[in-house]
Amino acid sequence: MASRPPRPLRILISGAGCAGPALALCLARAGHRVTIVERSASLRASGAQLDLRPQALAVLNHMGLLDAVKAKIIHEPGMAFVDCRGTVKGTVLADPSLPLDNGIMRGDLVRILYDATREQADYIFGTTIDSFEQDDHCVVVFFSNGFSGTFDLLVGADGQNSFIRKAILPPYSPDPYFRLGVHMAYCLVPHMPSDTTMRQVYHAPGGRLVMCRAHDPTQTQATFNLVDSSSDMVDMYKTPLCKQKEFWAARFRGAGWQTDRLLDGMLDADDVYFHEVVQVRSNTWYKGRVVLIGDAAYCPSPFSGMATTACLVGAYVLAGEISQSSANLPQALNNYETTLRPFVKETQKVSPRLIRWTIPQTRWGIGMLHFILRTMRWLRLPWLMTRVSPEDKGPWKLPDYPELLNPSQHLYIG
């Protein structure tokens, strides 16, 4: 007698950013019943430009979304390092040999993933998970709206400050945050004629870095980086948004170049993001029937250029292992971690010392950095910097999961 196929699993995902919907699409394709709960009242289709590496493009191809992503790709020619007068001191050009080695606006990728999943998964907006209980057979989840539900698996895709991660970490676990000593602010400001598709990078004394680039005719991305390990920064994040804006404005006002204009845009912006740049290095990715993906488990930091790639690859691997071992979830979750950890280890190879060196504290340090950039430009070596990227490191290869293949996918050669 033929054995029965495993029944579809009831899976709850916390977080409707990139990792959650990517996982939902793969799981739904394998026949599982997926619900996504999101704390925002509606889809949060905003945010910074995201990098997409070859592994991410391969996953998007498996999902059947590569063409949709290609249509939204932002082609960035490179970076220009400028002084307080706007004079270019050095450039680092994008490598044209790397396919689509640019980026996509977070809002565009979130919309693409949402449109691909809204008919296949149930979305619950404006709701959070208050608590959950689990045994060997199920997870009972209690929501902020007073309702509860029973699921076979709970997935935490709720970011670097994950509530789910905090709930499953063993008592007295080490701090999962690997702190890089840098803080970041991001917003969109009104476009000016001087803004270009080339990313402009300006250094100011005091460990301050300002970047801007235009991604459409009406808006310019503005990013502020600050090297500061003091307790003042920790306290700042506990204040209201308006106070955080004032804090950043006070630290950067009068820094030179176009900083004041970008600060004025930040103060008027509705969507502003302030956060400490960290890596999440958790020894625990799952406990029983609760598992973590994306930044909740292994955030590599924006400086790695691999954060979005890691969350897409992680979603694909978790869905693949579940599809192959749905009748044995402990085995599936163990295989997920065993398969993915070598890749995550590569994505997190970021040097805090090197990061701080590229954001100097003194005018002398800025002058030395500009001298090195001018020398590289004179020697025609900027392309070397584009070669130092995680996708070129290590032997890890994206696994094949035939159960997840989109029937209409086309061949992608990375």
Image: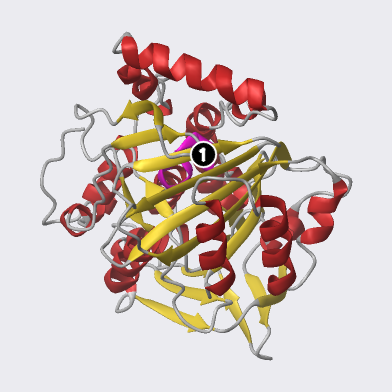
Along the line of sight, the residue nearer the viewer: 38 or 267: 267
Name the residue carrying label 1.
84
Asked if one can make out residue 327 in the rendered structure from this viewpoint, the answer is no
Q: Does 339 lie within the magenta span?
A: no
The residue furthest front is 85
Q: Residue at x 14, y 56 (%)?
A: 407
Along the line of sight, the residue nearer the viewer: 240 or 69: 240
Choose top left, top right, bottom left or bottom right for residue 23. bottom left
Q: Residue at x 43, y 46 (%)?
A: 321
Looking at the picture, does residue 398 appear above or below residue 401?
A: above
Segment colored magenta? 302-309
Residue 248 location (% of width, % of height): 68, 57
Looking at the picture, does residue 231 appear above or below residue 99?
A: below
Residue 251 location (% of width, % of height): 71, 52
Residue 310 location (% of width, % of height): 46, 43
Q: How many marks?
A: 1
Q: Quick check: 299 left or right of 161? A: left
Which secondary structure, mark 1? loop
Along the line of sight, the residue nearer the viewer: 357 or 173: 357
Q: Quick check: 180 left or right of 158? A: right
